[in-house]
Image (cartoon, rainbow, N blue to C red):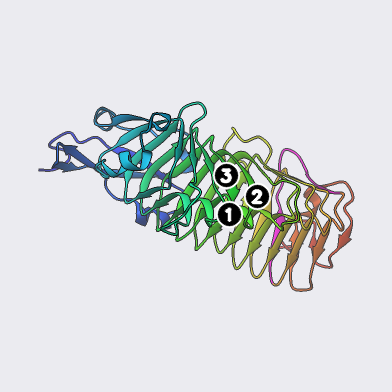
Amino acid sequence: MTAKQISCDYIYVTTSSRKQSQYLKPRRKYVGENLEAICKVQVVRRSDFHSVPVSAAYAQNTRTITVNCNNGQSLNRTLSELNKQTPAIVIVQGTCTEYVPIDGFESLTLRGQSGAAIQQPATNPHSNSYALSITGSQGITVSGLAVHSLPSVFSGIGIGAGSSQVPLQDVHVDGSWGVWVYEESQVWLVKVSVNITSGYAAISAFDKSDVHITGGLLERPSNGLFNAGVFVFSGHVTMQGMTIRDMQTGIDIYASGSVDLVNVNPVGGASLVVSGSRGQGVIVTNNSHATLAGSSITGGSHGGLVVANLSTIDVQPSSSLTLVSGNVPDLFCDTNSFITGTANLAGVPTVNCGNLRSGNTVPLP
């Protein structure tokens, strides 16, 4: 029986690159436990639209469950009783003091009501790495939740093992590291805030993972720790509307990582604001690259834009110039690295860099 013969609707998903489409599997229609048909998946680029229309059949088959942890219910126990391939919405109420693993799920939504939170327990007998862990999953949406972690875990939220189509929206994370994305996973962070109190970075992208950030705030308390707002190690991050303040390093890009600060979604506003870094505002090293547009990098104690070891920073034209000011110095590069597009910088930055280009490329034939 073909999808056409049973009027199997298309389910639309999005991907930011063709490479990531390898993680997209056909969504399946279930009637009870019997597989009725395999629906087709239409892959489209994120830039083509801002909403994700889902078939009527998909919506009708979605199960909704409410978990009230303040009344003794368990989010983890509820998830363990679900069919991982059947769409489900879990409404979370109260504070769930437990580790929450999401492994191998498709089309699952965790939706927190006002004040809902996942709190890491005081003990960690099974050596969990994350308070909330998402692995090997697709179409996982987390919204309206706070995640509180302790130094005994690696990070508050971990998303890995090729997980894709994972949007986190209006999520607050505090404690260890923040959000760690690894093993070629694909994540959207929309108005996510992180207050990091231990570990190194508030948001991290490793292992060729792809992270899209729209809006949000990354910060840390006044302490003696060395922290970064965003750490990109061989991953790719696209950012707009993010504010990073009072970190030692605003953005740390390393090992062929890349960051693009561009207008990907009108919700975000300005591309990036980095202020009051105790170290560098944006540091790009070891064959890595960053693209800035309409950003603000101010008050870095050890450099605003810093580029070294065969790396580049490109400042693109935008509706407003990129402000790099009040850093010591504003622009720094070694002899093997370049900063291009300096004509798109506002003001007169202080410079310790011999490889500046006013245009975005050298003159081309």
> In the image, which residues are magenta?
310-325
* Badge 3 element: strand
Q: Of the residues tagged 1 and 2, which is closer to the observer?
A: 1
| Labels 1 and 2 touching (C-beta < 8 A) | yes
Q: Image check: 278 left or right of 67?
A: right
Q: Image check: 217 left or right of 15?
A: right
Q: Image check: 164 left or right of 287?
A: left
Given residues 304 and 202, the one toward you in this image is 202
Residue 191 tag number: none
Instruction: Provide the residue designation for mark 3.
Output: 213
Quadrant of the image occupied by residue 11: top left
Work out whether mark 3 precedes mark 2 in sequence or the reverse, and give the earlier one.
2
* Badge 2 element: strand
Q: Is residue 71 visible?
A: yes
Q: Is residue 365 visible?
A: no
Given residues 240 and 7, the one toward you in this image is 240
Q: Residue at x 18, y 39 (%)?
A: 30
| Labels 3 and 1 touching (C-beta < 8 A) | no
Q: Is residue 126 magenta?
A: no
Residue 151 tag number: 1
Marks 1 and 2 sit apart, C-alpha to C-alpha, by: 8 Å
Instruction: Pinpoint residue 74: horizontal percent, then vertical percent.
Output: 36, 38
Marks 3 and 2 sit apart, C-alpha to C-alpha, by: 21 Å
**Which three-letter amino acid code belongs to the residue tagged 2?**
Thr
Instruction: Provide the residue designation for mark 2.
Output: 197
Q: Of the residues tagged 3 and 1, which is closer to the observer?
A: 1
